[in-house]
Image (tube, helix red, strand yellow):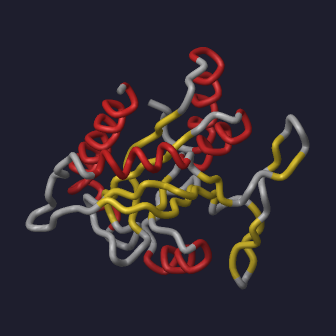
Amino acid sequence: MSGIGKVNAALTTTLLLEHFRPKQLLFTGIAGAMNPTLHPGDIVVGQLVAHHDYGGRMPEGMLRVPTKNPYVFTDNPIFFPADSGLVAISKVAAKDIQLQSIGEYKPQIITGTIITGDVFLADTKLNQQLQKEYNSDAVEMEGAAVAQICYQEKVPFIIIRSLSDSADDTAVLDFKKYGKTAAENSAMLILEMLKLLRK
């Protein structure tokens, strides 16, 4: 339970790593869709995770600037890579679960790119702009902060998000309508992964 936003997520992750020393970290929740082929209820397993609001926003788009690792004074990657082993486990787990449907739609699970910023995105035009800049599949408010802390501390991680809306002009209404089902779908995948990790 990190709370909303990147500062809360980074603080919670730091405390978690410091006090419990986990071997790996799985972080989940809900997000908005950016890939136009995705819909509420779908799940994006974040193979790559990036900040979309760090750097300089210029008239021609976002000037990407890497975050810094303050301990060793080096640049972090723009896109933080998930642990390949955890991604592989997510694919196995996906075969063993039945996600809750949204009406007649049967949700899918994909591996893709998730971007993070300290705003709830409910703007079709900005969604399209960011999707073009980052080739992103989902947008949310915590994942890259978690990923950055784990990357700097050398802790394997994975960010998994189920879609509650399409991060567009109707996102607020869709979030209220589909948020609960999306959260339950993401939890379902995580629980199945935990079963596999215990074996």
Query: Which residue is rendered at x = 65% and y = 28% of the image?
Result: 14
Query: Which residue is rendered at x = 41% and y = 73% of the image?
Result: 35
**Can you say which quadrant of the picture contains the N terminus?**
top left
Residue nearer the viewer, 29 or 112: 112
Q: Is residue 6 left or right of residue 55?
A: left
Percent position of residue 11, x then y: 63, 30
In which quadrant of the rendered view does residue 111 lie?
A: bottom left
Residue nearer the viewer, 138 or 196: 196
Check the image and name the residue furthest to the right.
Answer: 73
Check the image and name the residue furthest to the front.
Answer: 199
Residue nearer the viewer, 26 or 181: 26
Check the image and name the residue furthest to the top.
Answer: 19
Q: Is residue 55 left or right of residue 5?
A: right
Q: Is residue 125 left or right of residue 81?
A: left
**Can you say which quadrant of the picture contains the C terminus?**
top left
Percent position of residue 134, x then y: 59, 72
Percent position of residue 75, x then y: 83, 52
Q: In this rendering, is residue 159 above or below 115?
A: above
